[in-house]
Image (spheres, rainbow, N blue to C red):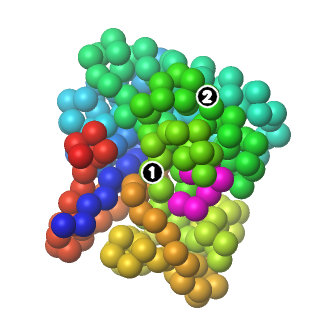
Amino acid sequence: MLKVDLNSDLGESFGAYTIGNDKAVLKYVSSANIACGFHAGDPYVMHKTVQTALENNVAIGAHPGLMDLNGFGRRNIKISPIEAYDITVYQIGALAGFVKALGGKMQHVKPHGALYNMAAKDKTLAEAIAKAIFAVDNSLILFGLAGSELVKAGDAIGLRTASEVFADRAYMADGSLMPRSMPGAVLTDDAIAIKQVLQMIKTGTVTAADGKEIQVLADTMCIHGDNDKALNFAEKITAALQAENVAIKSFMAD
C-alpha cells in the first residue's frame, strides 16, 4: 500500500489575531508544523496547538521562520549562516519546551516561508539549518522541498530527511515553488489540487507551470493552514487518498 505523511503549517495565530482553522485541520493531517513565534505564533498559541495535536495523535514539528511578523515570514531577508543557525536553534528550543511539558516527543523540523525557499537554493544556509537541527536533536527529521539543497544538507550531516511536496502550490520547471507574486501560484481549484496530489504520489512527477513533467519524491505533503480553503482541501484530499488506497501516516507511526 502506498503511504504519505500529510502535514500542515499551524499555530500561526498570535495575540488578538486568529489565522487558520487549526482545530479542524488537525483531524485530517498526520503531522503539524507549529510556528515558533518569529513569523507567527506566540507562547499561548504554541501551548494550545501542541496540546491539540497530541490529543489528535498528530506528530509535532517545529516550524522556524525569519523574524518577520509583519511579512508573515514570506519576505526574503538576507541573513548569515550563523544567524540561520541561531534562529533555528532558538525556535526549536521554544517549541520543544512545550512538547516536553505536555508529555510529547517532537518528530521533525520544517523551516517556514522565505527561510525554507532561500535554503532550498542556498547551500550555506541549508547547511547551517541542518547543523542547528542536528546539534539540538539528531533524531529529528528535516522536512525540505523535494530535490532541494535543504534535503541534501540534511542527508550529508546524517539527519533523516523527508522530501516535501505541496498540495496547494504550483511548480516551476526547476522544481521550485512558483513565487506567490505570480498568478496561479496558490491552487484554489479542488479538482486541480487533487489531480496534482495523486500525480505526485502515484507517479513521482508533477506538471510544472510550463507543462513540463518533472520528477519529485513525495514523502510528506503540505496543506497550508493559512490558506482560506485549508479545511476543504484537507477533507477532499483525505477522501481522494483513501479512495486510491493511499494511507496517511506520520513517520512516528511507521
Verify CB contact (< 8 Å) between mark 1 and mark 2: no
Q: In front here: 221 or 74? A: 221
Instruction: Specify the amino acid type for callout 1.
Output: Ala
Above/below status of 70 relative to 119: above
Between the C-alphas of marks 1 and 2, the distance is 17 Å
- Secondary structure found at label 1: strand
- The residue carrying mark 1 is 162
- Residue 145: image location, x then y, percent: 55, 56
Judge whether residue 83 can be spotted in this image.
yes
Q: In front here: 124 or 116? A: 124
- The mark nearer the N terminus, 1 or 2, is 2
Classify 10 Å Cα crowding around label 2: few (below 14), some (14-19), many (20 and above). Answer: many
- Residue 173: image location, x then y, percent: 65, 77
In the displayed structure, does residue 125 sit left or right of residue 132? right
Instruction: Specify the amino acid type for callout 2.
Output: Ala
- Toward which corner of the image does residue 239 lie, by quadrant? bottom left
For the N terminus, the quadrant is bottom left
- The residue carrying mark 2 is 132
Residue occupying image coordinates x 24% and y 66% = 2
Q: Is residue 24 magenta?
A: no
- Residue 87: image location, x then y, percent: 66, 26
Judge whether residue 11 can be spotted in this image.
no
Residue occupying image coordinates x 75% and y 50% = 122
In the displayed structure, does residue 122 sit left or right of residue 19? right
Residues drawn in magenta: 146-151
- Secondary structure found at label 2: helix
Numbered tag placed on residue 130 in the rendering:
none
